[in-house]
């Protein structure tokens, strides 16, 4: 099993969610995040004042998938989230040692499907 973590622009959350649903992914955890990457923040103007925003709003998606589906899910996320602009985000994958579904006690792949 693998944990896929994606940090993306909030504007692509709905297209990514729909693309993952078409791919059969059911369980997704989404949290608000703030970060700084290649774009190194941005400058905004408000009431005649210039402000530097160092941390940009993002969303963090976490999805646990089977080893067989990890490449397809990563590709689905990347394709749905890609705008071609700086700040599109990052996706990384790490091994998951164990998963337990609390309600039923199921473990392993049975707990994530």
Image (tube, helix red, strand yellow):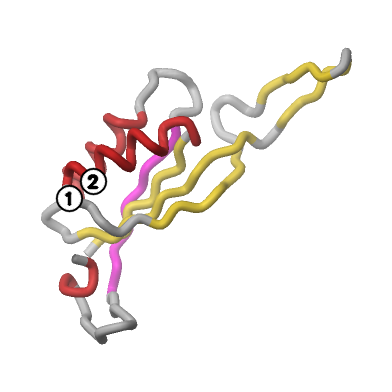
* Image quadrant where one finds the C terminus: bottom left
Residue 64: give x, y in percent of width and height: 29, 60
Q: Residue furthest left?
A: 68
* Residue 104 appears left or right of 110: right
Query: In the structure shown, which secondary structural element does the residue marked by tag 2 occupy?
Result: helix
Q: Tell me how many marks there are.
A: 2
Q: Which mark is residue 89?
A: none
Q: Is 42 above or below relative to 107?
A: above
Residue wearing tag 2: 21
Q: Residue furthest top?
A: 48
Residue wearing tag 1: 24
Residue 83: give x, y in percent of width and height: 39, 21
Nearer-the-camera pick, 24 or 76: 24
Q: Which span of residues is magenta-colored?
A: 89-97
Q: Is 108 above or below relative to 47?
A: below
* Image quadrant where one finds the N terminus: bottom left
Residue at position x 17%, y 70% in the image: 109
Q: Is 104 above or below relative to 5?
A: below
Residue 6: give x, y in percent of width and height: 40, 45
Residue at position x 45%, y 52% in the image: 30
Residue at position x 33%, y 38% in the image: 16
Mark 2 closeness class: few <14, some 14–19, many ≥20 residues within 10 Å? few
Inter-mark Cα distance, 1 to 2: 5 Å
* Residue 83 appears left or right of 108: right
Residue 98: give x, y in percent of width and height: 28, 76
């Amino acid at each position: 099993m693998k944990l896929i973590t994606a940090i993306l622009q909030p504007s692509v959350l709905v297209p990514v969610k729909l693309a993952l649903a078409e791919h059969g992914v059911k369980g997704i955890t989404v949290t608000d995040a703030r970060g700084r990457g290649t774009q190194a923040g941005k400058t905004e103007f408000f009431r005649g004042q210039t402000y530097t925003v160092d941390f940009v709003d993002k969303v963090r998606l976490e999805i646990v998938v089977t080893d067989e589906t990890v490449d397809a899910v990563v590709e689905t996320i990347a394709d749905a989230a890609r705008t071609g602009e700086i700040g599109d985000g990052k996706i990384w994958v790490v091994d998951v040692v164990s998963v337990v579904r609390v309600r039923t006690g199921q473990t392993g792949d049975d707990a994530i499907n």
